[in-house]
Image (cartoon, rainbow, N blue to C red):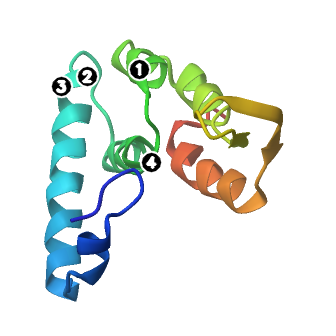
Amino acid sequence: MAHFGVCTEEELKTHVTAQDVNTALARHVHKVEQYVRRKVRHHRLTQAQFDGLVSFTYNVSNPSSVMEAADRGDMKAVYDKMLQYIYVFKHDAKGHKIGKPKILLPLYKRRLEEAAPFRQE
């Protein structure tokens, strides 16, 4: 089973099928969809907005400020806050951030796609 952290020798020897991976992915996506529905109850989202929040939330550890903005219907804030999650940090052996953050272009492009339904023209 996938998890954060270093795999044990036993885990590395375990055979994982494509079906196992797809099942785990589907379970996680379902949990993220439920989370978004719980957090955004006071503002109706379009399907594109819901999909963007699910994608974003799937990959971000603490999306609370984005969810709060979406729940109050502040689409500009959702867009702006989502685009703040474009940095990667190096970490030391204890997990502390070291050095300056870097922007990854593929991550920036992904955030633009996720945030697009919230863009105010």
Residue at mark 1: 64
Q: Earlier in the sequence, mark 3 or mark 1?
A: 3
**Are dots 2 and 4 in contact, CB under 8 Å?**
no
- Describe the element under mark 4 as helix, strand or loop: helix
Q: Amino acid at mark 4?
A: Asn
Determine whether, in the image, residue 108 is placed left or right of residue 55. Answer: right
Residue type, numbered disc 2: Lys
Residue 70 screen position, x and y as percent: 40, 23
Circle 2: element type: helix
Residue drawn 64% across and 50% down? 112
Q: Residue furthest right?
A: 100
Residue 117 percent across, percent down from the top left? 50, 44
Q: Earlier in the sequence, mark 1 or mark 4?
A: 4
* Residue 59: numbered disc: 4
Viewer-closest of 13 and 47: 13
Quickly name the residue at label 2.
39
Q: Tell me the crowding category of disc 4: few under 14, some 14 to 19, or many 20 or more residues within 10 angstroms, Cα based.
A: few
Mark 4–mark 3 Cα distance, whole angstroms, equals 18 Å
Q: In this orientation, which residue lies closer to the viewer: 86 or 10?
A: 10
CA–CA distance in space, label 2 to label 3: 4 Å
Determine whether 112 is above or below 87 in the image: below
Do the residues bearing badges 2 and 3 touch, measured as CB atoms within 8 Å?
A: yes
What amino acid type should be assigned to the residue bearing mark 3?
Arg
The residue at which mark 3 appears reads as 38
Q: Residues within 10 Å of mark 2 (few under 14, many from 20)?
A: some
Gap between marks 2 and 4 measured at Cα: 16 Å
Mark linked to residue 27: none
Q: Is 22 or 17 nearer to us in this picture? A: 17
Quadrant of the rendered image containing residue 90 = top right
